[in-house]
Amino acid sequence: MSKKFIVTVMLGMNRFSGEDTDHPFDMSCLDGFNVAWLPQISELEKTNSTPIYEMAKTVNEFMVDYNSDCATVDQIIKEDFFFIIGRGTLGNESEECLAEALLEARRVYGRYAFNMIYSKSYGVVDTLRAFKNLNEEGSRVSADLMFCIDGYAPMASRLSVSDMFSVDGNRERMFVVPKNIRKAFGVVQRKEGFKGLRVGRPGANNRWNTQIRQREVDSQATHYSGYSDGYSRRLNVSHNNMEEIVSTVRCVKYGGRMYVVNDLIKFLFRKYKEGKS
């Protein structure tokens, strides 16, 4: 049986306003995939959201590369992937919708499908809340990989999925990643806008954190230009630019190497497909 992949994208609340949705993407990279659009996603976000575009493009690139390199093994087809696309919101509706979609994905694709989550800002909090609730309900839904991009929400929402820890002699609030999420990467900034929380209990061997600095961005990719209208965005380290930054800058460390988020996803997808994860 062909191995399956579940790709969950949970946007932050900032993606529906201002310049964040001013520029469209060529979303043909999502054509042909099975997609569950959660009700919090607007029509504008379906074509003007960096995370949706970048995750669809990443899956396409993985399919092309894997099928080209591994012609003697089972080919990967679009039916092997199931996208869940939602957005973090105030209240409980977002995480409830996500939990239902994850249960449906497990029913259709099986409990052994590789489940990868990309989440930003409020989307991080609602994803963690959904997995915490699923774990407490004994649903046996799990995720292999989660990216938490500058995760943030009001304190009332954060309290249920975070705690205070001692980090380098200082007290710091961090996300507590439930045990049904196997690997979690936190990427945060400390310059402008909301200051995202890091992930995991300090010292845990399956939780990794990176703080993005302007000098690292400037040395690798000063602009993001994935838009279909030719626009190029200057990458200044801030909460609002984090999706573009993690798509172009090496910001996650795994196995002694630094990766762009998209490249690490493709690497771990390949390991799973080849039975090495």
Image (cartoon, grey):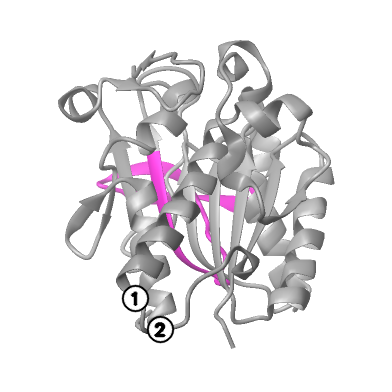
- Say which amino acid is labelled 2: Val
Numbered tag placed on residue 73 in the rendering? 2
Corner quadrant of residue 249: top left
Who's the residue at 39% across and 15% down the image? 232
Label count reads 2
Who's the residue at 48% across and 45% down the image? 57
Numbered tag placed on residue 122 in the rendering? none
Instruction: Please say if 228 is above or below 52.
Output: above
Residue 124 visible (yes or no): no
> Secondary structure under badge 2?
loop
First to last magenta residue range? 159-187
Pick whichever, 230 or 172, lies toward us.
230
Instruction: Please say if 221 is above or below 251.
Output: above
Expressed as whole percent of the image width and height from the top left, the position of residue 127 reads 65, 52
Circles 2 and 1: CB distance less than 8 Å? yes
Expressed as whole percent of the image width and height from the top left, the position of residue 70 reads 34, 76
> Secondary structure under badge 1?
loop
- Say which amino acid is labelled 1: Cys
Expressed as whole percent of the image width and height from the top left, the position of residue 153 reads 62, 34
Q: Is residue 85 located in the magenta-colored stretch of the structure?
A: no
Pick whichever, 37 or 255, lies toward us.
37
Q: Is residue 47 left or right of residue 251?
A: right
Residue at image mark 1: 70
